[in-house]
Amino acid sequence: MNNRILKEKFVGKIMLILVIFSGVLILIMGIALYIKARPILAVKPFWELMFSLSWHPLRGEFGFLPFIMGTLWVTGIAVIIAIPFSILSAIYLSEYASKFVREWTKPLVDLLAGIPSVVYGIWGVLVIVPLIKNHIAPFFGTFSTGYSVLSAGIVLSIMVFPIIIHISLEVFNSVSNGMKEASLALGATKWQTVKYVVIRKAMPGVIAAIVLGLSRAFGETMAVLMVAGNVAKIPSSALDPGYPLPALIANNYGEMLSIPLYDSALMLASLVLLLVVLFFNIISRIVLIRVEKSTQ
Amino acid sequence: MELKTHISVQNLNVFYGNEQALKNISIDIPDKKITAIIGPSGCGKTTLLKSFNRLINTIDEVKVSGKVFVDGENIFEKKADVNRIRKKMGLLSQKPYPLPMSIFDNVAYGPRIHGMNDKKKLSAIVEKYLIEANLWDELKDRLHSPASKLSVGQQQRLCLARGLAVEPEIILGDEPTSALDPRSSKHIEERFLALKNDYTVIIVTHILRQAKRLADYVVFLYLGELIEHGPAKEIFENPQMEMTKEYIKGVIS
Amino acid sequence: MNRNKIEETIFKILMINSTIIILIILLLILLTIILKGLPAMDWSMISQTPKGGYYLGKEGGILNAIIGSLYLAGGATILAFIISLPIVLYFKVYAKKNSKIVMFTRFSLDVLWGVPSIVYGAFGFTIMLYFGLKASLLGGIITVSLLILPIMTRAMDETIKMIPIELLEASYSLGANRIETAFKVVVRQALPGILTAILISFGRGIGDAASVMFTAGFTDNIPTSLLDPVATLPLAIFFQLNTPFPEVQERAYASAFILTVIILIISIVSRFLIKKYTKYIIK
């Protein structure tokens, strides 16, 4: 009997240790990357690294600006494309679609989320890159290899559709029926109810969903690496190649240990990615928790 | 007592999927009286109420057959204008659902939806109906704060004002006092008694004493069937059906 | 009044079209992979490891990557399961209601879910350097297990949360203690949900490339120990596509086809489990 109680206590302690471990894992990650990034921060101040254009690892020059701009270009394009499509479909699926359509569409959207990023990359190379090279660039009277921030943005936008749709659907569903009925009972049409009540009520949650999608696009690596072109210059148009931060890290892990400070620079890049994504995620998660609480 | 019919229900059947929620209901609801729909929970009271303004049609997989005449017009007819029908009826639900906007905008929501944009007229409307719902004195200084900040009792009266602002003929109440404290409940009940001179009031309630206090006419439902209906006095003092007697005595609940 | 109707119609058309376009894109992706991948498939792709000069277009297949991915994702799933099951059981059985630790950990896991896999890769690499570990199956397993930990934990948590508290109370009133209740009642009740969580995590693990780049290495051989480097399907696809030889690039399409088929099977099976599970919790 005593043995049983001891065992129960012991198992509880082990469980608690694992809970605490998973709770602080994100801190451990941040600290580990910071320790690795310290050597380069000791040589050059953070802001100088971030705003310098010159990237010559062999000469010890690590300017991140081209990569940061590359990331901003692809993320920006992805979000601009993703917002209208995913919000409109989310409204359709939650407010207008029949039960049949809803039940068939949701798993398909989730399937889109399950496709590995390397497959998106291949698809981008096979479909989007030629499309831009042969049709879109000539249409604007310029030349592009097709490997561009626009290609990366398009592929990324498709990758964030399911995230934005999934979370916005949950947010729209959390708008109570009673509130919709109150509006309908006043003689409002369905559309007026959607426009003035549902969207208004869901707005904070929908913005949180968009931010979560944005942060996914921000850190996505493989697909971007495969279609963005990877030229370390600030893109001057959407048809130019770019070199986003995650692609930089992924492309250079092989040689980074042979050049001084290179590994530290790449770890700093990872740390920056982590911090930016953390910032976005923490804010949107807090908003989503508020949304959930306000409907209970 | 002399009764003029306002809503006439004929052979109404409602199915949720395969489950029949209302079985062949036929009744006449009198004009400018308070009608109480009573019965144990799950007996179809709310379903019947929501059939009157066709909110029932917003539910997935619902099937409706039969006719409901409001002012002589069958509202379940294909070409019936749902929005105009709903505008004729104000709804108070079990819990108050203020819309996600200010107090002023809540009351002005209906008139605006129906095309009223004149600021002065809107202010006048808001004032008039907040007075009618007995809220004006409490709220006149903070009309532009969010409605969700009000107490539950105030929210329910705000919902009443919001419903009245579209100038309905009928007020539907779905257990409108069930989420309220006794004082707020009393407030709402007093409003109903005052309103019945100008409006037809229909409330669903499972509180027998409330029905006795308010109702002129009573409809008793049990498991989707209409058991008995008639003037309140007759139903409460001399029910004809065994089931009604038992319910009123509190044997079944 | 009429304007409102027109507006609604326009938006409805836009909404329906958006949904259709998204579904068409999904179809287009699958179709592209099938049409490009299937013709490049042959039996040697999945039955052989790369022979000398494979990446120049010579004989061989990607059995090393298929087996490697299964080992790696399998190992990572098992490791993540060993960590996450006790966590969710703690949430349900041991923790007090509204416990601060539980709320914090749930939040932290949700945030972890959003961390890009390349960051996990960099972190895994750092840890491995610290312990003097080379790029290997073990390194890959540890990194990927951290990557799928938040997914698996939160997915299991969501289903275990649904178990009514009365069921636990019934178990306690029969004299069972908390471990017995956790493993005999909670786990059994949530089994389909737990299996689904495992499958989803496995699918995520097998498809990820950025986290294993630094940590698992790449090799033409099938690993024989945890300390051997290991090839993975996503990286094999990436490397084959990056060669200048069209016939090797076609093998990348075939490899992508194989990976997509694996993912599709996983997603169909887990969908099936979810269906079964929701039927089961209705009462």
Image (tube, coloured by chain):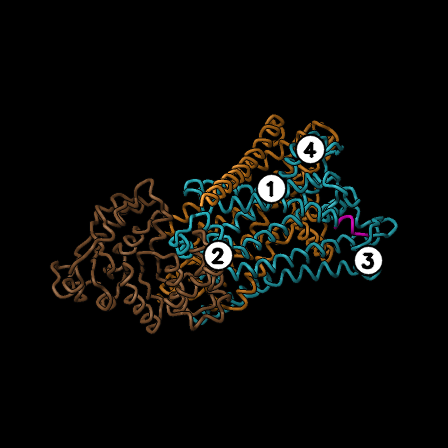
Chain colours: A cyan, B brown, C orange
CA–CA distance between discs 4 and 3?
A: 37 Å
Amino acid carrying label 1: it is Ile
> Badge 4 sits on which subunit?
A
CA–CA distance between discs 3 and 1?
A: 34 Å
* Circles 4 and 3: CB atoms closer than 8 Å: no
CA–CA distance between discs 4 and 2?
A: 49 Å
How many numbered circles does the render carry? Answer: 4
**Which residue position holds label 3?**
A48
Residue A116 versus residue B102: which sits nearer the camera?
A: B102
CA–CA distance between discs 1 and 2?
A: 45 Å
**Which residue position holds label 2?**
B118
Numbered badge on residue A158: 1
Q: Is residue B14 above or below residue B184?
A: above
> Badge 3 sits on which subunit?
A
Q: Nearer the viewer, mark 2 or mark 3?
A: 2
**Which residue position holds label 4?**
A136
- Find residue C112 and report its image quarter: bottom right
Amino acid carrying label 3: it is Glu
* Circles 2 and 3: CB atoms closer than 8 Å: no
Q: Is residue A39 above or below residue B149?
A: above
Q: Is residue B251 above or below residue C270?
A: below
